[in-house]
Amino acid sequence: EHLKKEVIHVLEAELADNVKAHWLQADGSYIKPGRRGKEVLNSQDYFCEQAISDNPLKQEKKKRHTFEPIMAPES
């Protein structure tokens, strides 16, 4: 069921793409779909952003670790 939802999610995003999409015409030529009045969606950028935000290592990188040297006690 989870995989089915994931596939549907991918297909919906791909079919909604109106930036890099081209429609095949009956004569074999391609045209770009109109974007007037529609939200611009580039599916490649969308999936890249989603992969970055879903990456568990991204949260770890936000933590900053500062090097603090161990100093010898003063005599």
Image (spheres, grey):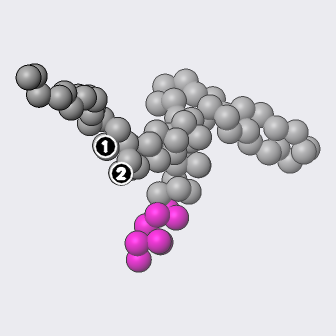
Q: CA distance from mark 1 to mark 2?
A: 6 Å
Would you name the residue on which mark 2 appears?
A: 56
Q: Pinpoint residue 52: horizontal percent, then vertical percent.
A: 44, 42
- What residue does disc 1 label? 59
Q: Residues within 10 Å of mark 2 (few under 14, many from 20)?
A: few
The quadrant holding residue 32 is top right
Q: Which residues are magenta?
A: 1-8
Dot 1 alpha-carbon crowd within 10 angstroms: few under 14, some 14 to 19, many 20 or more: few
* Residue depicted at x 59% and y 49%: 15
User: Main structural element of the magenta stretch: helix, strand or loop?
Assistant: helix
Name the quarter where the C terminus is drawn.
Answer: top left
Please state which amino acid type lies under the numbered disc 2: Pro
Q: In the picture provided, is 64 more to the left or to the right than 8? A: left
Check disc 2 and report its element: helix, strand or loop. Answer: helix
Question: Residue 70: x percent and y percent?
Answer: 21, 32
The quarter of the displayed image where residue 17 is located: top right
Tell me whether circle 1 and circle 2 mark residues in contact (CB < 8 Å).
Answer: yes
